[in-house]
Amino acid sequence: MPTIAVDAMGGDLAPDEIVKGVAQISLTTDIETVLVGDERRIQAVLEGVSYNPEHIAILHAREAIGMAEEPREAVKRKDASLLVAVRAVADGRADAVVSAGNTGACVLACAKHFRLLRGIRRAALASVFPRQREHPGQDRFALMLDVGATVRCEADELVQFAIMGNAYARRVSKVSSPAVGLLNMGSEDMKGGEALAEAHRRLRLLPSINFVGNVEGNELVRGKADVIVCEGLLGNVTLKLFEGISEVLYDLTNAAGERRIAWRFGLRLLARGIERLRALTDYTQYGGSPILGFEHLLIKCHGRSTAHALGNAVKVAAKAVRDRVPAEIADTLETAR
């Protein structure tokens, strides 16, 4: 089984929820994990839960990177748990990293210690999100990239993001021919400016990509595309919008239920529809997002990840390692040259 290095000190709920998530994984799977961080604090959490010590090792790191810290400066001056975890993979002690910590620091840590795959210009932070399914066998999650590693992109990068997302969906989601679309402001080929128009033209000519054209915002939660390609700025805003809708729905239903009996009755009548809408925007359903383009993988979890979400991310990381995702991306890039 793969060995996954877990940044125990990264995230809003670290180290408690991170360590508890790894403890649960140790009891239910054969995945080997290395908890990286303050050994004393990690051990204190482990002593309060059930876990299998045969599947958990601890690698001490005396520092951590805060969620609000400036990423570049923190990566430069700290020997933090995130950096120690990434180095463990680069040195061959582990096969992939999982962190719920500072997103910018995760990207920079990978850039510092991992090599880009040959031909890749920029790495991409990908994220899965729930959506409707249009045909049997379609994965209930779509993959979007980039969602924050790069702010602005040229056509070359967008095409490479499509190739990386296509390879990841094939390996991890087991979709034999993922439908790939460009997030844009209209369906016409020339919409969105020069970079998007050029990326559209080139993707249409790639035989290895099942390109379905432009995808508009109202189509994101439908099943038109399994992989959605966009600039990091647009992808990040879109992802945060999904999260915000889910949180607002949760707050509104709770507030309405507390105020009036009639409203509670109405909520019961609407419960199925509200739950379906929340399910389409609920970021807690998935474990984490891969940083793609390097020879090794880092799965970035949401900063507020609970033990359950962290455990899901470890499973995704192990699956991606077993399915040789970086090698699949490299092979697809060679084919597309």
Image (tube, rainbow, N blue to C red):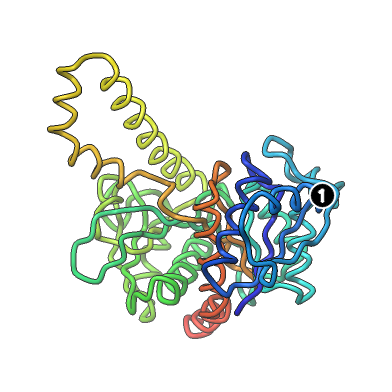
Q: Nearer the viewer, residue 131 or 14?
A: 14
Q: Nearer the viewer, residue 34 or 166?
A: 34
The part of the image, by quadrant, that contains residue 222 is bottom left
Q: Amino acid at mark 1?
A: Arg
Q: Nearer the viewer, residue 232 or 242?
A: 242
The part of the image, by quadrant, that contains residue 276 is top left
Q: Residues within 10 Å of mark 1 (few under 14, many from 20)?
A: few
Q: At 18% across and 20% down in the image, what residue appears? A: 263
Q: At 60% across and 66% down in the image, what residue appears? A: 26
Residue 76 at x, y = what percent?
A: 84, 49
Which residue is the site of mark 1?
40
Q: Nearer the viewer, residue 113 or 84?
A: 84
Is residue 235 shown left or right of residue 175? Answer: right
Q: At 34% across and 44% down in the image, what residue appears? A: 281
The residue most toward the top is 259
Tell me the SS state at disc 1.
helix
Identify whether 321 is placed above or below 284: below
The tally of labels here is: 1
Is residue 230 shown left or right of residue 48? Answer: left
Residue 45 at x, y = what percent?
A: 69, 48
The part of the image, by quadrant, that contains residue 252 is top left
- Quadrant of the frame with the N terminus: bottom right
Identify whether 258 is placed above or below 77: above
Is residue 218 shown left or right of residue 1? Answer: left
